[in-house]
Image (spheres, coloured by chain):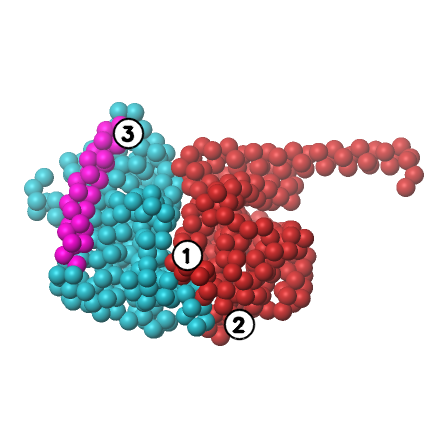
Chain colours: A cyan, B red
Amino acid sequence: MNLAAGFRMVLALARKKLAQELAYKASLLMWFIFPFLFIAPYVYQARFFAGPGGEGVGAFTRLAGTDNYLGFIVVGATLWYWLTNLLWEIGFSIRDEQSMGTLEQLWLTPAPRWLLITGNAAANTVINTFMSLAVLGIAHLWFGLRLTADPGLLALACGLSWLALYGMGFFYSGLVMLLKEAEGVVRLGNEVVLALAGVTYPLAVLPGWAGVLGKAIPLSWALKVLRGILLEGRGWAALSGDLLVLALFAILTPAAGLACFGALERVTRRRGILGEY
Amino acid sequence: MSTSPANVGLATAGSGAAREWLAVVRAVTRRQFVTLLRYQASFWASLASPFLSLAVAMFLAKAFAGAAGPEGFAASSGTADFRSYLTLSVLFWAFVESQLSFGFGLLGEMERGTLESLFLTPMPRSAYLVGMALYSFARTGLSVGLTLAAGLLVFGIEPPFNPAWAVGLTVLNLVVVHGYGLVLAAVVLLVRSGAFTYAWGSVLPLLAGQTFSVGLLPAPLRAISAALPLTYGLDALRWAFSGARPAFPLGLEVAVLALSAVALPAIGLALFGRVERIARQRGSFGQF
């Protein structure tokens, strides 16, 4: 399959997915309201623990490097929600094809399998972008969230984060295919990432071993860079080291994810359980 | 009561019916556990989930606790024992979620087309509902027990502030939570969709103040929060376990909780029966 044909296929899959989503107006509303409902309790918990006179803010500032705990949590939880949506989407698209008995037919077409997964991810990117903007907008209105950014730097950081996070999606696809379970795999993975990647609190608060694990998750580096840009207004020079690490994740995660996907798919096919559910 | 042959016969028939009822409860509970164990990833996820939720809440709290301890929390709540406060809140929420998902079990039966077959059997409906609730409580109890053990090791949880009240309020709260589950299961049966339950489950942590006092909420949300029995139950429990200052007068919280423990399960059962009759008349058991 040549590049143009591959691009057309990804576009067709993305359009199909978007048409499906737009057909269910109520579900569409959920994409935008529910992330805020997920984030708000963390912000209120933080306010409760910060104290009525801000007694706990000093401790937070020493660990996080910023006193803007509201922005810290909203940015962290929004990006985590992005990853969650992505993994649910990719995991369940495979599982749904298995349940409907169409995965084997789809896999028999000459289309590269990684492109079939990328099609769903492309549609998910559009939805997730709108979701994130909506959450940040609601957080601005509700909590008075204020962000600042160098547009060029932000675009680069978002691009690198996208590659690093979507690379994780390939690995999940293979796992769901093999285990024939989407919900448990994705739920467990998301909760572990929520606990270890410094989504609502700085990594410095974790015990040593957990902090090391947290630093191995691409999301924690994406958050470090994005928080630096959006909350502290840091520039290219200040973020160069963190950007380099994120760039490494942006190269390595998709490559490792694809390799894992290929290996897990081969095991699934050898066992003859591709169409089982 | 005299022991005439007729009365002995009635008693024998009664104990037979009770045995059958218990057999249904056992069968329903067992079936649910067999299904759960069939999906290993979901099983492990359900075991680990409360501990991971607790870890997230604890680390967020620790981020605001300096060398002098949790000063901000102490000023907000009137106690420095944030570990008990959060442990209780998160573990109690695991039971709330288990009962919220009760309706999803029914929805699963609808989607698989097995609800009609199930309800065509002569089993008492109450036995089915109790079996499902028992399974939910047992499964959650297992993960909560493991979380408590792990929480003791990792975070060091204090003993309850007021043990006697802690036990009494826990029992009342579990009854209320089961009542919630029945009401929501009836809603699922009526609307043949889990969307309402899902939406309710998403907004409830904010409205009931899952890990914070509802006093922090803006006035309109506080008004909705004050209309929810769960708010009072959770707040009273936090007082009993950690000594945290209640958001409402404690007497009011206990009174609302006790009243809800009587009313909600009764309303739930009555509603479920009524909705089941409607579903039979519409012939909508198999639709989703």
Q: Residues within 10 Å of mark 1 (few under 14, many from 20)?
A: many
Secondary structure predominantly adopted by residues drawn in magenta: helix
- Mark 3 belongs to which subunit? A
Q: Which residue is mark 1?
A: B62
Say whether disc 2 or disc 1 marks the residue closer to the N-terminus: 1
Q: Residues within 10 Å of mark 3 (few under 14, many from 20)?
A: many
Q: Residue at x 48, y 36 (%)?
A: B36
Mark 2 and mark 1, same subunit?
yes
Camera sees residue B197: yes
Camera sees residue B108: no
- Mark 2 belongs to which subunit? B
Q: Which residue is mark 3?
A: A268
Q: Residue at x 58, y 50 (%)?
A: B159
* Amino acid marked by disc 1: Lys
Disc 3 on helix, strand or loop? helix
What percent of the width, then of the height, locates residue B6?
A: 87, 35
Q: Which residues are magenta?
A: A239-268
What percent of the width, then of the height, locates residue A202?
A: 32, 56
Quadrant, the N terminus of chain B: top right
Disc 1 on helix, strand or loop? helix
